Amino acid sequence: MLFWLMLGTLETDEREFVLSLYVQYKKYMFGKAMSILHSKADAEDAVQTVMVNIIKNIEKFFGKSENEIERQIVIYLRNAAINLYNHNKRKRMHEDGEMSETTAEEQADLEKLVIDNETIKLVRQAIALLPEEMRDTVKLVYVYGYSNIEAAQILGITANAVGMRLYKARKKILEIAGEELLDRYAKG
């Protein structure tokens, strides 16, 4: 419902663009959401959340190739569905009286490394080995150029949680490819 209301506030070209994305990807998104949520109502909610996020971040979609758009939609959808699944799970756990905690770790300093084509290749390979939630966060911030706040909205988490995921991702990248990256940095 919110998607349709927000759609009405867009300029004509933006509205047509978003509608074309909806028509093109609605069945795919619904199927993927169903595979995660196993509920028609929740899958529909996930698709609506994706479309609302696309509207909120429409400037990130203009001028992108179809492959880039599809990758972003997949990230949006996967996170919307997983967040809804986790929300439902937390709700059930809360009803049962169970709670969970999050802990913080120290920050790695990957940004100081000299980047060249080989280093980029190494980093991409390391990113591909990251757990999905870290990989999605890294892609949203470092590949697609979203701010931590924007990525947080897309992922349905806090900006601090985005920062923590990025920290953990940088640390994991250093674990995976750190020795070779540091060798390149020392030579650079």
Image (cartoon, helix red, strand yellow):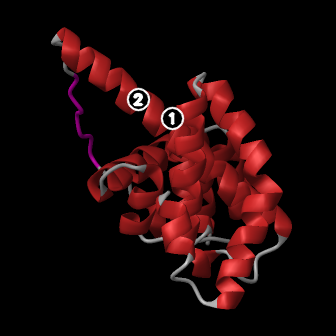
Q: Position of residue 101 (x, y in %)?
A: 20, 27
Where 59 falls versus 22 (above or below)? below
Where 26 falls versus 104 (above or below)? below
Residue 105 part of the magenta-drawn span: yes
**Is disc 1 surrounded by few (<14), some (14 to 19) or many (20+) residues within 10 Å?**
some
What are the residue bounds of the magenta stretch?
A: 100-106
Where 76 falls versus 57 (above or below)? above
Label 1's element? helix
Residue 103 part of the magenta-drawn span: yes
Q: Position of residue 142 (x, y in %)?
A: 55, 66
Give the total number of marks visible in the rendering: 2
Q: Position of residue 8 (x, y in %)?
A: 55, 78
Q: Amino acid at mark 2?
A: Asn
Q: Give the residue pinned by disc 1.
A: 82
Residue closer to the observer: 162 or 105: 162
The numbered mark at residue 110 is none
Residue drawn at x 61%, y 72% as measured from the top left: 188
**Is disc 2 surrounded by few (<14), some (14 to 19) or many (20+) residues within 10 Å?**
few
Examine the image and state in which quarter residue 17 appears: bottom right
- Residue 184 as seen in the image, left or right of residue 167: right
- Residue 163 as seen in the image, left or right of residue 2: left
Q: Give the residue pinned by disc 2.
A: 86
Where 45 falls versus 38 (above or below)? below
Residue closer to the observer: 135 or 32: 32
**Does the CB distance between marks 2 and 1 fall below 8 Å?**
yes
Q: Amino acid at mark 1?
A: Ile
- Residue 1 as seen in the image, left or right of residue 148: right
Q: Main secondary structure of the magenta part?
A: loop
Judge whether residue 182 can be spotted in this image.
Answer: no
Label 2's element? helix
Q: Residue furthest left?
A: 97
Q: Position of residue 89 (x, y in %)?
A: 37, 21
